[in-house]
């Protein structure tokens, strides 16, 4: 089923010059970019995005990190996009992330794990509306889709 997922290329990805390579991985997989922007994250948005972690010992550090430098928010669309993106990102703790995943190839620290990806379709919908205004998510056709996607997708 066609889904949309939110990916954040966190401040460490921007600072390490990995924005292009990371977006390239998702594009090469066949996922469609339907939203894309560089964001200076406010404390309010950071706290709303990570509300589920409020009260945990790392919450303050997490908010400080995500607001420390711009990040790139990406909305990706494709069949089973949420699960596909999660599998490409790898386990939260980079020491547990499989080689071939983004974190397994490029990260060492849980706090600096390069990317956030929605963990379920319901979370994705909530996160996408938090990070993008409705008019910033675009529906369009790609000519390559007849090669990359099955007709029913
Ligand atoms: P993310 O997928 O963005 O979702 C929650 C984030 O919290 C996670 O990636 C990590 O960056 C961060 N996180 C989770 N556990 C810890 C931890 N023990 N210490 C620091 N950061 C953490």
Image: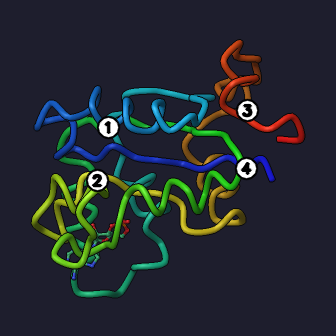
87 in relation to 13, above or below: below
Query: Quadrant of residue 40 in the image?
Result: top left
For image coordinates 23% across by 87% down, the residue present is 57
Q: CA distance from mark 2 to mark 3?
A: 29 Å
Q: CA distance from mark 1 to mark 4?
A: 20 Å
**Residue linked to disc 3:** 134
44 in relation to 111, above or below: above
Q: Which-is-in-front pick, marks 3 and 4? A: 4
Callout 3–callout 1 Cβ contact below 8 Å: no
- Asked if ligand 1 lies within 8 A of label 1, the reply is no
**Residue linked to disc 1:** 22
Q: CA distance from mark 4 to mark 2?
A: 21 Å
For image coordinates 29% across by 26% down, the residue present is 20
Q: CA distance from mark 3 to mark 1?
A: 24 Å
Residue 50 is situated, as x and y percent measured from the top left of the image, at 43, 67
Circle 2 residues within 10 Å: few <14, some 14–19, many ≥20: many
In the rendered structure, the answer to whether residue 78 lies left or right of residue 76 reads right
**Residue linked to disc 4:** 3
Q: Which-is-in-front pick, marks 3 and 1? A: 1
Q: Nearer the viewer, residue 8 or 142?
A: 142
* First along the sequence among labels 4 and 2: 4
């Amino acid at each position: 089923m066609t889904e949309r997922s939110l990916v954040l290329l966190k401040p460490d990805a921007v600072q390490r010059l990995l924005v292009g390579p990371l977006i390239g991985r998702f594009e090469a997989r066949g996922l469609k970019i339907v939203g894309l922007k560089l964001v200076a994250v406010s404390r309010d948005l950071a706290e709303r995005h990570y509300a589920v972690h409020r009260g945990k010992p790392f919450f303050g550090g997490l908010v400080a990190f995500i607001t420390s430098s711009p990040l790139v928010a990406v909305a990706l669309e494709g069949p089973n996009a949420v699960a596909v993106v999660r599998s490409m990102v790898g386990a939260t703790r980079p020491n547990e992330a499989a080689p071939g995943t983004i974190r397994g190839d490029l990260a060492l620290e849980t706090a600096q794990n390069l990317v956030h990806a929605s963990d379920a379709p319901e979370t994705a919908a909530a996160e996408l509306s938090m990070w993008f205004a409705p008019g910033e998510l675009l529906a369009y056709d790609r000519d390559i889709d007849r090669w990359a996607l099955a007709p029913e997708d």
